[in-house]
Amino acid sequence: MYFVSKTIRLKDGRQALLRSPEPQRDAAELAAVLKTVCGETDFLTKGADEVNLTVEQEKAWISGMNDSPNKLSIVCEAEGKIAGMCHLAIGGTRRSAHRGEIGISLLRRFWGQGIGSAMLDELIGVARQKGLCYVELKAFKNNTRAVALYEKKGFVVLHETPDAQRLPDGMAQTELFMRKTL
């Protein structure tokens, strides 16, 4: 699925562009951004050392997202660089086609600028246009900023999974499964 580009204003007054990623243009940068994001936070399921996508693999992933009627990927471009990305994946079978799964990741230097909120709004809007009943996501309980955003947007916790992830220092993280009814 392709996204119609949209300019947004960040909280500090700068402008950013939400758009579909392009395989040739964005694959190398997206792979690097993903590796960086995974190294900047413990709130994702992988560490930077576990992200080893080749440019060709990233190109294939972008093409698959863009060509799929049930998947959408959006990147946020700020200052001429990719600041973050998000996706919506609509259930893969007829029995789950009423649900969509959301994922968002953002470079730390862009946290608190309204990008995550804007991307989330766009994904929810597309989910509504597609006639979905629910959008769902997973977040770690100690990611209080993200959980607060999701709750502000109407997501509720359906269940918690204690010890869903263990960090290298042994700290266990509880994963929340959250849902928004559309």
Image: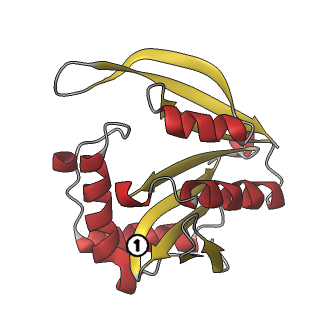
Question: Residue placed at 44% from the left, 63% from the top?
Answer: 84
The quarter of the image holding the N terminus is: bottom right
Work out whether residue 160 or residue 13 is closer to the camera in this orientation and state it: 13
The quarter of the image holding the C terminus is: top right
Quadrant in the rendering for residue 154? top right
Given the current orientation, which residue lies at the most extreme front position? 12
Left or right, 7 with respect to 54, comes to right
Q: How is the image coloured?
A: secondary structure
x, y percent for residue 126: 74, 61
Left or right, 178 with respect to 82, comes to right
Work out whether residue 181 or residue 43 is closer to the camera in this orientation and state it: 43
Question: Residue placed at 43% from the left, 60% from the top?
Answer: 110
Q: Residues within 10 Å of mark 1 (few under 14, many from 20)?
A: many
Left or right, 93 with respect to 34, comes to right
Question: Residue placed at 67% from the left, 79% from the top?
Answer: 4
Work out whether residue 139 or residue 53 is closer to the camera in this orientation and state it: 139
Looking at the image, residue 38 lies above or below residue 155: below
SS at circle 1 = strand
Question: Residue placed at 64% from the left, 24% from the top?
Answer: 157
Q: Which residue is mark 1?
A: 82
Report the amino acid beneath label 1.
Ile
